Amino acid sequence: MKDARLIQKLEPRGLRLAPSQVWGRLRLVPVLRDVVRDDLRLSRRGYGDAVSVVTLEGELKGRGLRYVTYIPHGLVVDWSPRQADATYGTRLHVQDGKKVKAGPLAVRLLHRMVRREDKHQLRMLPLHLAMEGFLALHFGGPELAWAEYSREALSRGLSPRSEQAYPGWSEPLLDGALRTFELHERQVGLLLFNADELLSAFVVPHPEDYRALHRTLLEDFYGELLLQFGFLSEAPALGLTLDDARVRSLEDLGTEVSRMRADWADFHAFMAGGLFGVDVTSREVYEAGPFLLQRFHTRLVPSEENHLGEAIVGPEGTLEYLKTLRLSAAQTRRAYLLQQLAEADWALDEAAEVMRTTRADLLVRLENAGFGYLVKPHVLEEARRAVGKSR
């Protein structure tokens, strides 16, 4: 039986949106939580190394899959009963990983994307958890020995996969916006837009957690949309006004302000419609007491806006933690191609038929997406000639 906490459609349950704050072309939409739990907290664990190597299987220094990237910090998830408030944070600085020398560089070796550290505590690597799942999509390659595939594809599957991302500090506007705008009393998160395109969403369980983690948005990584709109003008101010004709008393004024805030929230939710309210594919990662940690991605349809992310859902279905990444068009195309091949059992003709294209065109698209090594060279050459003749 499927766990009811496993997300099938991402909904901001337990959250509401406040009026946005605009800084140049960046729009920051505060996320508020009126009912705050006292049994789930998040905090930062700094690493600060240039490179981290995460062991995904086996022993820390043994053979197996590795995830290599820059990881400036992890998150510690604590679901202790809150009568232990006086000791909150005392277990945050346990030894995590091992530093080794790799030539002139210091490298941190980390064990697993999510690691249990105590009865009510685990450490996770935020957003890298979701990215690792994305990179692993259909990683095994063909399971049947189709004649068209290369020996490498049949024996090893996909070669080591990589995707490019950009740290928040690479966009100076983000630093200015985070330093300038004040936080709401009940703020637990932020929707980040660039030229009114949703870049990311970040939500935590508690306002105090968000205040401590607010600046980590500069350390997080983002898709190419963070920098792609550098030539555009500032984001427009979206003004709403009170209807003077409806205000005859303080009570009327309060009603109008509430209506205006509701209109703001509805509009910002509409702007984030490519993430909230859409179907997602989720996979359980860890059951932390009454909470379920999971990672997810949207439908990966090239004509749509697509996101990947991770979430913690509470026992009542409330969204307690959320961190997302907007995928670029090229990243979506790569994932879509692999998805279609896998669903067709890697049969090229069958996949091409489902995609309403030709086998030759599919092969050329695979090469353009960086997967040409999966196919035997002479098969790929024949496809190039066939596509060239058809144009």
Image (tube, grey):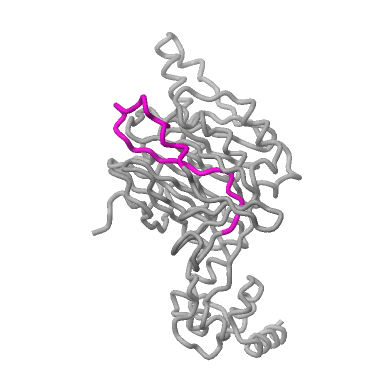
Which residue appears at 35% of the width and 26% of the height? 85
Query: Where's residue 343, x and y in %?
Result: 44, 74
Residue 32 shows in the view:
yes
Residue at point 48%, 80% (across, down): 142
Quadrant of the image for the C terminus?
bottom right
Left or right of residue 172: residue 345: left
User: As drawn, is 82 to the left or to the right of 63?
Assistant: left
- Residue beneath the point at 36% across and 54% down: 8
Front residue of this view, candidates 166 and 249: 166
Farthest right residue?
231
> Residue 55 magenta-drawn?
no
Q: In this view, does 121 lie to the left or right of 329?
A: left
Look at the picture and state if 384 lies above or below 327. below
What residue appears at the point 44 percent right and 45 percent down from the top-left corner? Answer: 123
Query: Is the N terminus in the top left, top right, bottom left or bottom right quadrant?
Result: bottom left
Which quadrant of the figure has residue 317?
A: top left
Q: Which x, y percent locates residue 32?
A: 45, 30
Above or below residue 276? Residue 349 is: below
| Residue 379 percent location from the top left of the image | 62, 89
Q: Give the range drawn in magenta.
A: 68-94
For the residue pair 375 and 240, the one nearer the viewer reads as 375
Quarter holding residue 121: top left
Look at the picture and state if 185 lies above or below 384.
above
54, 63: nearer the viewer: 63
Question: How many numbered discs sit on the rendered protein?
Answer: 0
From this viewpoint, is residue 273 visible? Answer: no
Q: Position of residue 220 (x, y in %)?
A: 58, 44
Query: Is residue 72 rendered magenta in the image?
Result: yes
